[in-house]
Amino acid sequence: MAELAMNKTQSEFRKGFQSGVSIAIGYAPVALTFGLLAKTTGLSFGEAVLMSLIVFAGASQYISLSLLTLGTGIFEIILTTFIVNIRHFLMSAALNEKCEEDQLVNKAIYSFGITDETFSVAAMRDDTVTTGYMLGLNLISYLSWVICSGIGFLLGASLPQSLQQSMSIALYAMFIGLLVPTMKKSVKVVFLAALAACFNTIFTLTNAFSTGWAIVIATLLSAVMIELMERGKE
C-alpha cells in the first residue's frame, strides 16, 4: 500500500515537473535580466541570489531594485512588495479548493512556490491538484528563477563598467514591458496607473513624503479611489 502511494506521488511529481518546463523556459530571460540589473544596482552576488531564493516574485524583486536605487527604507520596500503580492492570498484560496486534502505543512511548502504562472497551470488542470504535482511544478520553476538570476548577475559582472551603469535604464523598460500588456486588457488598470503616477508626482514635488512612502501611499490611494468609483457605478 505504501509502495503504491509512493509510486503515485512520484508519478504526480513527474507530471508537475513536466508541466513546469514551459514556465521555467519563460522565467529564464526575465531572471537573467533581474540578475543583470541586480549587479548594476549594487547588490552582491549573494544578495541577488538570496532575494530570488526568499522572495521568488519577479515584479516585487524589480520594484525592490528600483526602490533600493532610490535609497528607500526597508520598511517601505517590504510594505510595497506586500501590496504588490497581495493577490497571492486570492490565488492560494482559489487553488486550495482544487487541491487534495493534505497536511498543513505540505500545503505551506508548495504555497511558497505559487506564482501567476504556476497558479494558471495548476488551476487549468482537469484532475485534482495533488501535493506531488504542485511540488514538481513549483520546483522546476523555482530552480529556473534562482539559477538564471545568478547567471544573469555573473554575466553582468563581465560587462564593462560603463555598460553596467547604463543598464539601469533597462529597469524602467522592464516596468513598461510588464505594465503595457495589462493596460491593453483593462481600462481600469490604465486609470489606476495614471492616477498613481499623478499622486506620486504630487507627493514628490511637494516633498509631502519620502520617496518610498510616496510610492506606497500613491498606490494605496489610487487603488481605493478606483475601487470606490467602480462600486459607485454598480
Image (cartoon, grey):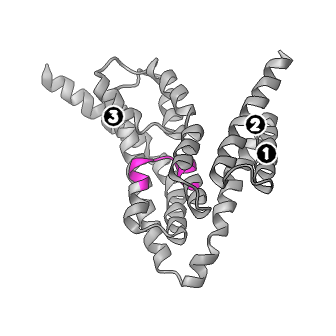
**For marks 3 and 2 on the same chain, the one whose residue lies earlier in the sequence:** 3
**Residue positioned 26% across, 30% down in the render:** 9
- Asked which secondary structure carries label 2, the reply is helix
Picture residue at 47% right of the left edge, 31% below the top: 122
At label 1, the amino acid type is Phe
SS class, disc 3? helix
- Looking at the picture, how far across and down is residue 129, in whole percent? 40, 25
Residue 68 lies within the magenta run: no
Task: Kindly identify which numbered label has been placed on residue 68.
Answer: none
**Which residue appears at 36% of the width and 32% of the height?**
133
Using a 10 Å C-alpha cutoff, classify the residue at mark 3 as few (fewer than 14 neighbours), some (14 to 19) or many (20 or more): some
| Range of residues picked out in magenta | 51-62
In the image shown, does 50 or 127 lie closer to the viewer?
A: 50
Nearer the camera: disc 3 or disc 2: 2
- Kindly indicate the quadrant of the structure image that contains residue 104: top left
Report which residue position mark 1 lands on: 199
Q: Which residue is mark 3?
A: 109
Residue 150 x, y percent position in the rendering: 41, 64
Residue 71 lies in what quarter of the image?
Answer: bottom right
Report the label total.
Answer: 3
**Disc with the residue nearer the chain's start (3 vs 1):** 3
Q: Is residue 147 left or right of residue 229?
A: left
Residue sitting at x 44%, y 21%: 96
Q: Main secondary structure of the magenta part?
A: helix
* Structural crowding at the residue carrying mark 2, measured as other residues with C-alpha within 10 Å and reported as few (<14), some (14–19) or many (≥20): many
Q: Would you say residue 124 is visible in this rendering? A: no
